Image: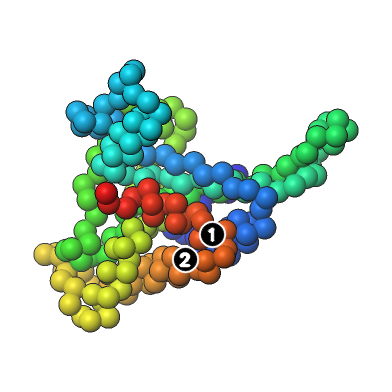
Amino acid sequence: MVSVTRENIKELLPEIEASIADSFFVAIDTEFSGLNLGLEESRESRFDSAEQRYTRLRKNVKEASLLQLGITCFFNGPLGESTDAEENGEIGYRATCYNVVLAPADTGLLEFEAKPLAAEWGAMRFLRSHHFDLNQVVSVGVPHMKAMAIEHFAQRISRGTAALQHNDIDKDSLRQAESEVQQLQRIIDADAGKTTEFVFENLKCAYQSG
């Protein structure tokens, strides 16, 4: 299992993209700050259909923060040290797991300021009981933004019309923010035929409005 943070994302991104492209299939897992943040219309009912429950959870999770993205790439055998599946004529897989710790991108700009963190105590306790390090989210979380926000940010920066926050940041911080957004933009603009596009398009759909 590979831990991906702000400190090593640049080095690991080519490896992650290659693993996704070469894999037989990819599994995605997410960890949010909550699944039921007290919204009446989002509370599930035992009478809900699967579609109704999904719709409720999707609406509710928009209020939560995405803390971790898990990407597991499965490859056709061999199974490493285990050969039981091969001896039984079963299909074996090797798996490579990447755990990407996430945090909202800090651009230093008023209109792109990250929304306040909303969390559910039960979710926080669950994550902590499974050894999830919440300190990593704050200290080394990989900056992320919605795809539409990235495009809007790039346009405002190029036109020089973005307003700084009240506590104006220095030029070095702004350059760092621009670099992070450009990196995210390159991911979004990846070739449509690549499997990476599938991953990020699904994330985009999960957060799009409506």
User: Who's the residue at 29% across and 30% down the image?
Assistant: 36
Q: Is residue 157 left or right of residue 129?
A: left
Q: Residues within 10 Å of mark 1 (few under 14, many from 20)?
A: many
* Residue 183 locus on image (x, y percent): 43, 69
| In the image, farthest residue toward the top | 46
Q: Amino acid at mark 2?
A: Ile
Q: Are marks 1 and 2 in contact (CB under 8 Å)?
A: yes
User: Who's the residue at 39% across and 55% down the image?
Assistant: 204
Name the quadrant containing residue 6: bottom left
Name the residue beneath numbered marker 2: 187
Name the residue beneath numbered marker 1: 196
* Residue 148 locus on image (x, y percent): 31, 63
Q: Is residue 88 left or right of residue 203?
A: right
* Residue 34 locus on image (x, y percent): 32, 34
Q: Amino acid at mark 1?
A: Thr
Local secondary structure at mark 1: helix
Q: Is residue 68 left or right of residue 112?
A: right
User: Who's the residue at 28% across and 37% down the image?
Assistant: 60
Residue 29 can be seen in this image: yes
Residue 57 can be seen in this image: no
First of labels 1, 2 by sequence position? 2
User: Who's the residue at 36% across and 68% down the image?
Assistant: 181
Quadrant containing the N terminus is: top right
